[in-house]
Image: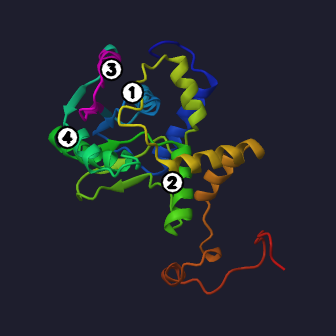
């Protein structure tokens, strides 16, 4: 390992959860060249750290290229990230694309610029992936991101969906993978402290947070504080779907479901 020989308990858990996602959804194929999106946050550092460690010992050969998008935010300095990647012998590409002025100019007063900023950054990553000959784009979304997205869709979109672990991008060419979807944010935070990731400062895009996402995150934390293990159970539920107990008529028809079985239903609140 880069800084210590024996991994901590948190790192062992993260390795296990990463491997579970990679195997379960067949995220990596032999010979893949994977673009790892490096924002400079703890999650992107953890993603690169774990994938690079895996690449050294995995039976399936694959390579990584770290890509950081500099969108022209005032005061943004990626030098600590660049130095960290260079010290690890990583292939690195910094893409300069000044989309920050566009984001701030088109974001209504009091609204969060995060959504538009992310869309533009994702488009840049897709373009760079093709330029660099990458076969996959890896993003650092973790367990809590998955659950917050689930709650946001339930509450504001009327949809029962979380984050897809593997998807074909809108451009019809790039394949996006999310290897950290089973990984707990608390353990990623521990990893960041253990390895002293030089996390870049946040808040460069303005003061307005994504209030809806923030509220869902707080709700998750409250549930976990009240019922230890709630987050793990919610994640397990996303991977343990009972189509007969959902109200999607089209899904029933596509699966040819005649009716649900009463045995073992386990719902609460019925009379």
Check disc 3 and report the residue beneath it.
85
Q: State the image quarter where residue 79 is shown.
A: top left
The magenta-colored residue range is 64-86
Compare marks 1 and 3 and give the one earlier in the sequence.
Answer: 1
Q: Position of residue 34 (x, y in %)?
A: 30, 38
- Secondary-structure class at tag 1: helix
How many residues crowd mark 4 within 10 Å: few (<14), some (14–19), many (20+)? some
Check disc 4 and report the residue beneath it.
128
**Residue at horizontal 76 percent and vertical 70 percent from the top:** 267
Split into 4 quadrants, where in the image is the C terminus?
A: bottom right
Compare marks 3 and 2 and give the one earlier in the sequence.
Answer: 3
Q: State the image quarter where residue 99 is shown.
A: top left
**Residue at horizontal 49 percent and vertical 50 percent from the top:** 24
Check disc 1 and report the residue beneath it.
52
Is residue 81 rendered magenta in the image? Answer: yes
Tell which residue pokes out farthest to the left in this image.
Answer: 131
Task: Tell us which disc is closer to us: 1 or 3.
Answer: 3
Task: Tell us which disc is closer to us: 2 or 4.
Answer: 2
Q: Position of residue 154 (x, y in %)?
A: 56, 64
**Residue at horizontal 36 percent and vertical 31 percent from the top:** 204
How is colour applied across the structure in the image?
Answer: rainbow
Is residue 135 visible in the rendered image? The answer is: no
Q: Position of residue 122 (x, y in %)?
A: 29, 46
- Numbered circle sitting on residue 149: 2
Left or right: residue 37 versus residue 185 is left
Mark 1 vs mark 3, CA separation in Å: 11 Å
Is residue 147 visible in the rendered image? The answer is: yes
Is residue 58 rendered magenta in the image? Answer: no
């Amino acid at each position: 390992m880069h800084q210590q020989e024996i991994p901590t308990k948190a790192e062992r858990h993260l390795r296990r959860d990463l491997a579970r996602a990679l195997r379960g959804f067949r995220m990596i194929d032999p010979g893949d060249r994977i673009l790892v999106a490096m924002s400079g946050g703890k999650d992107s550092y953890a993603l690169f750290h774990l994938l690079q460690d895996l690449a050294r010992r995995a039976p399936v050969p694959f390579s990584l290229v770290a890509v950081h998008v500099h969108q022209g935010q005032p005061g943004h300095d990626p030098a600590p990230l660049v130095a960290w990647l260079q010290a690890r012998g990583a292939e690195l590409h910094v893409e300069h694309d000044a989309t920050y002025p566009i984001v701030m100019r088109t974001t209504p007063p009091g609204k969060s610029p995060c959504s538009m900023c992310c869309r533009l950054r994702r488009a840049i990553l897709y373009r760079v992936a093709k330029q660099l000959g990458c076969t996959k784009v890896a993003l650092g979304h973790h367990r809590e991101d998955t659950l917050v997205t689930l709650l946001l869709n339930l509450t504001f979109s009327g949809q029962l969906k979380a984050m897809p672990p593997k998807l074909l991008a809108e451009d019809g060419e790039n394949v996006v993978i999310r290897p950290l979807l089973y990984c707990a944010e608390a353990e990623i935070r521990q990893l960041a402290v253990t390895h002293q990731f030089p996390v870049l400062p946040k808040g460069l895009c303005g003061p307005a947070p994504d209030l809806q996402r923030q509220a869902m995150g707080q709700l998750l934390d409250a549930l976990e504080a009240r019922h230890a293990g709630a987050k793990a159970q919610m994640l397990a539920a996303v991977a343990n779907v009972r189509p007969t107990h959902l109200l999607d008529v089209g899904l029933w028809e596509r699966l040819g479901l005649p009716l649900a079985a009463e045995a073992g239903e386990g719902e609460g609140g019925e009379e």
